Image (cartoon, rainbow, N blue to C red):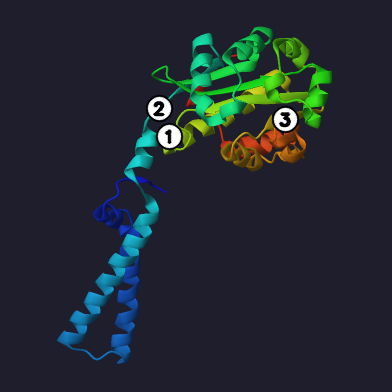
């Protein structure tokens, strides 16, 4: 169906005009039959009243239907902006910017930039940024592998993400052989806006393509992620992540989520997102 850019009452009427006309003609047919049957008396007054009612009902239906078809200006502005995105390994400058964006959101859970730099040195391919057509950073995500003994403690909740040091992070070549993969550092600029929602949509698509490119489906794997905010928790649940360990039993006091990384699950999410390749380019 067509979506039109306006929030005015006239635009709503125009958007639903076809439906309104169809209702008007339908009423005309029914009332014509009633006239012929003598149910409605023929007269100037009755014709005027009937016509007034038909027009009123038609306009009301057009308005109701049009309201379903018309997008507010802010939504259309968000959809029309940022026609193209690029996903690529994260630069040092954009990693710094991403860290500053999430700092007030994550608070005490925010990882120091110096520590993130240690992670990135061990696995630069694990850090990905998304920029728009103006080269503005709009999204970022981190996918890393951790040294197995540390990952075991992390899964149990006896250590937190803040204790991950450079020596705990494995290279991409080593990470590809792991059973457990950790997703960290997801950032979307202006996440509470319509435009932010669009960027989050693009980020999920990029992550799907990234995971398939690097990890494929050659062995059983589990993806883990910590829900630091209610927004991230909602996102994980929408992607069918399940709680692996409850925050009440963890030193970081946050729920740890997990999902088995299988071809069927990947395809299920990808079908929900759709193909965004005409909008976004990925370089690994």
Label for residue 82?
2
> Sequence order check: which comes first, mark 2 or mark 3?
2
**SS label for mark 3:** strand
In front: 11, or 113? Answer: 113
**In this view of the protein, can residue 206 be seen by the observer?**
no
Which residue in the structure is indicated by mark 1?
195
How far across and how far down the image is residue 172, in percent? 71, 12
> Sequence order check: which comes first, mark 2 or mark 1?
2
123 over 155 or under it: above or below: above
Which residue in the structure is indicated by mark 3?
224
Query: Do residues under tags 1 and 3 come within 8 Å of each other at their CB atoms?
Result: no
What residue lies at 74% left-to-right and 10% top-to-bottom?
Answer: 167
159 over 239 or under it: above or below: above
What residue lies at 65% left-to-right and 42% top-to-bottom?
Answer: 237
**In this view of the protein, can residue 224 be seen by the observer?**
yes
- How would you rate the neighbour count of disc 1 (Cα within 10 Å): few for under 14, some for 14-19, many for 20 or more? many
In front: 70, or 183? Answer: 183
Q: Disc count in the image?
A: 3
What residue lies at 22% left-to-right and 75% top-to-bottom?
Answer: 52
In front: 20, or 133? Answer: 133
Compute the Cα span from label 2 to label 1.
9 Å
Label for residue 46?
none
242 over 99 or under it: above or below: below
Closer to the observer: label 2 or label 3?
Answer: 3
Query: Do residues under tags 2 and 1 come within 8 Å of each other at their CB atoms?
Result: yes
> Sequence order check: which comes first, mark 1 or mark 3?
1
Question: Quarter-wise, where is residue 195 in the image?
Answer: top left
How far across and how far down the image is residue 201, in percent? 53, 34
Compute the Cα span from label 1 to label 3.
27 Å
């Amino acid at each position: 169906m067509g979506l039109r850019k306006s929030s005015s009452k006239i635009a709503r009427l125009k958007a639903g005009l076809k439906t309104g006309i169809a209702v008007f003609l339908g009423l005309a047919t029914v009332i014509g039959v009633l006239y012929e049957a003598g149910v409605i008396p023929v007269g100037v007054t009755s014709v005027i009243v009937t016509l007034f009612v038909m027009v009123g009902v038609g306009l009301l239906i057009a308005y109701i239907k049009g309201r379903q078809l018309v997008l507010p200006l802010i939504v259309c502005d968000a959809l029309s902006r940022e026609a193209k995105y690029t996903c690529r390994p994260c630069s040092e400058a954009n990693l710094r910017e991403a860290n500053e964006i999430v700092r007030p959101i994550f608070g005490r859970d925010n990882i120091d930039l110096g520590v993130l730099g240690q992670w990135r040195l061990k696995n630069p391919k694990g850090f990905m940024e998304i920029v728009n057509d103006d080269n503005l950073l709009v999204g970022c995500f981190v996918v890393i592998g951790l040294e197995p003994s540390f990952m075991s403690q992390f899964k149990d909740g006896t250590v937190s993400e803040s204790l991950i040091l450079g020596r705990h992070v494995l290279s991409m070549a080593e990470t590809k052989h792991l059973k457990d993969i950790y997703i960290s550092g997801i950032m979307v600029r202006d996440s509470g806006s319509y435009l932010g929602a669009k960027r989050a949509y693009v980020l999920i698509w990029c992550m799907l393509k990234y995971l398939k490119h690097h990890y494929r489906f050659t062995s059983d794997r589990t993806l883990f992620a910590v829900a630091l905010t209610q927004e991230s928790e909602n996102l994980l649940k929408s992607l069918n992540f399940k709680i692996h360990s409850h925050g009440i039993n963890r030193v970081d006091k946050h729920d740890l989520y997990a999902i088995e990384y299988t071809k069927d699950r990947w395809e299920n999410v990808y079908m929900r997102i759709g193909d965004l390749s005409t909008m976004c380019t990925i370089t690994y």
